Amino acid sequence: MTMTASLSTGQADNLLSPALSRIRRIRTLGPAGTNCEAAARHYAGLRGLDIEVDLHQTLEEAIALVADEPDAALLGCVVYPDLHKLVFPFLGRMVLADLFLFDTFNMVLAARNSGDRIHRVASHPAPSSLVPPGCDIHLANSNSEAASLCRSGEMDGCITTLAAARREGLSVVADHGAVPMGFTIHVPTTDPGAGLPHVDSPEHEEAGSTHARSGTH
């Protein structure tokens, strides 16, 4: 079952709807067959957007382009270990505009053949805890890349999606099922202050309280 939900507040929706409605391109993690690509296409349908989906080797590569494209957005994932690097370095240039839930493909441990001895396993950092104990972990940029490394013989096995495993002709050793996942939408802003909440200084708060008590405006 696919889960979909908007996690935006009503106020944020009102403020950011124009930014979301002008999206014509979503950049996210590739190569073809990633959970991020599937989530991007789902999001386009959810929002009624007519878009192109561009796939990149890393999310960092993608956001560097999105920051200078007014009609583009970055799709990230809440379990991406370096998600903070897609937010804080871009304050004033990018804003986290939307969040939604979408089931991943089934996450699997796969090998070239079901009887293969598995010692070296390729995995994206996020699902690497699914690697069997005692195996050596080789970090890949995506689930799809992990499957390709296994297929080429560079790795004995991989943690990947069922879709990627099938595409690469791999045998599924263990199926962990689909995972309800959160995905993030980041858009550029033309307002240098957008995304930066205004925080009154203690002096300002004290002055405001004095004005309220004295009846001045």
Image (cartoon, grey):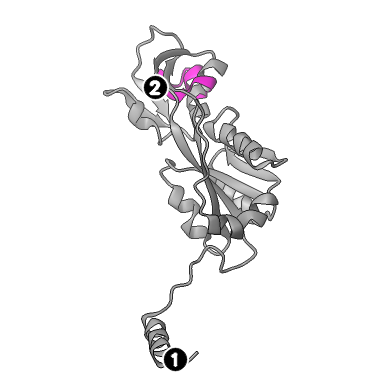
Which amino acid does the dot numbered 2 rest on?
A: His
Could one spot residue 30 in this view of the protein?
no
- Residue 27 position by quadrant: top right
Location of residue 46 with respect to 146 vertically, above or below: below
Location of residue 194 with respect to 184 vertically, above or below: below
Element class at badge 1:
loop
What residue is rendered at 43% in x and 29% in y? 179
Q: Is residue 131 left or right of residue 26?
A: left
Q: Is residue 37 left or right of residue 161?
A: right
What residue is rendered at 49% in x and 47% in y? 7
Q: Position of residue 13 (x, y in %)?
A: 58, 54
Q: Position of residue 127 (x, y in %)?
A: 39, 32
Q: Position of residue 20 (x, y in %)?
A: 64, 51
As rendered, which of 55 and 205 lies closer to the eye?
205
Which amino acid does the dot numbered 1 rest on?
A: Gly
What residue is rendered at 56% in x and 65% in y? 194
What range of the chain is rendered magenta? 148-163
Element class at badge 2:
loop
Q: State the CA–CA distance, disc 2 to disc 1.
A: 63 Å
Could one spot residue 115 in this view of the protein?
yes
Residue 215 has which mark? Answer: 1
Residue 176 has which mark? Answer: 2
Badge 1 density bin: few <14, some 14–19, many ≥20, Cα 10 Å = few
Q: Position of residue 18 (x, y in %)?
A: 67, 56
